[in-house]
Amino acid sequence: MLGTVAVLVLFTSACGSEPPNGDTDFTVEQTTATPTPTQATPEAPGSSSDLVIKPGAIGPVNAGITKDEAVATGLFDADVKGVEGCTFELQWKKEFAGVDVLTREDGSIGSLGVTAVGPKTEEGIGVGSTLADVKAAYPELSAVSKAGFDQAGAFLSAGDDYIGFLFGDATPSTIKDSSKVSFIEVTHGKRPELMRSGC
């Protein structure tokens, strides 16, 4: 019994002994896990008015992407039969009225267009905005020049990405600050032609 008590005393004194340097101030270090921030997935646009126009892009769609990449956005139908035997490689889904897409021979997107009120730039510019509005929003806007079908246009670039604004009721010689944007086109790699015709 005496041996058992001696072992017990040794065991408890070892557990409660002071640190070798004589410091009796014990601290407990606590760590808390920092939560990892989750990145919110952007909500898919539900209509044309949800689309934001930027140089080279409308909403999440960039000019220059492949047909497969465009279809993967969920915003386009592929191989749509049109009138007079036309087949469209890509066409915006029906809920996106007032926007169009031109494709190249390989099906990739050559340009995206806005033909009606709805989509706007981050600065609030869209179809129906005046030349004065566009100039105020974009001091770096190009000078007005001939565009479209003998009409007036002005352009904005960001690297290889472009926005073109067509003033369909004006020519470079007749345009006024009150002239209104009738069409917007975005491209990558070359300045927009601001034209639409045929299939």
Image (cartoon, helix red, strand yellow):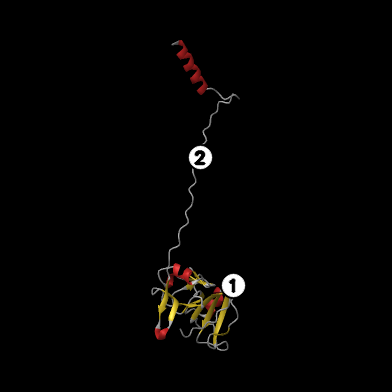
Q: Which residue is mark 1?
A: 160
Q: Quadrant of residue 190?
A: bottom right
Q: Which residue is mark 2?
A: 31
| 107 in relation to 12, above or below | below
Q: Secondary structure at mark 1?
A: loop
Q: Position of residue 191 (x, y in %)?
A: 57, 78
State the residue at coordinates (47%, 12%): 3
Sequence-first tag of 1 and 2: 2
Relative to the observer, which residue lies in front, 153 or 5?
5
Q: Position of residue 135 (x, y in %)?
A: 56, 77
Q: Which amino acid, by three-letter code, is at mark 1?
A: Asp
Judge the density around disc 2: few (<14), some (14-19), many (≥20) Cα neighbours within 10 Å. Answer: few
Q: Secondary structure at mark 2?
A: loop
Q: Which amino acid, by three-letter code, is at mark 2?
A: Thr
Q: Position of residue 173 (x, y in %)?
A: 57, 89
- Image quarter in which the N terminus is found: top left
Query: Horizontally, is 82 left or right of 62 in the view?
Result: left
Q: Quadrant of residue 150?
A: bottom right
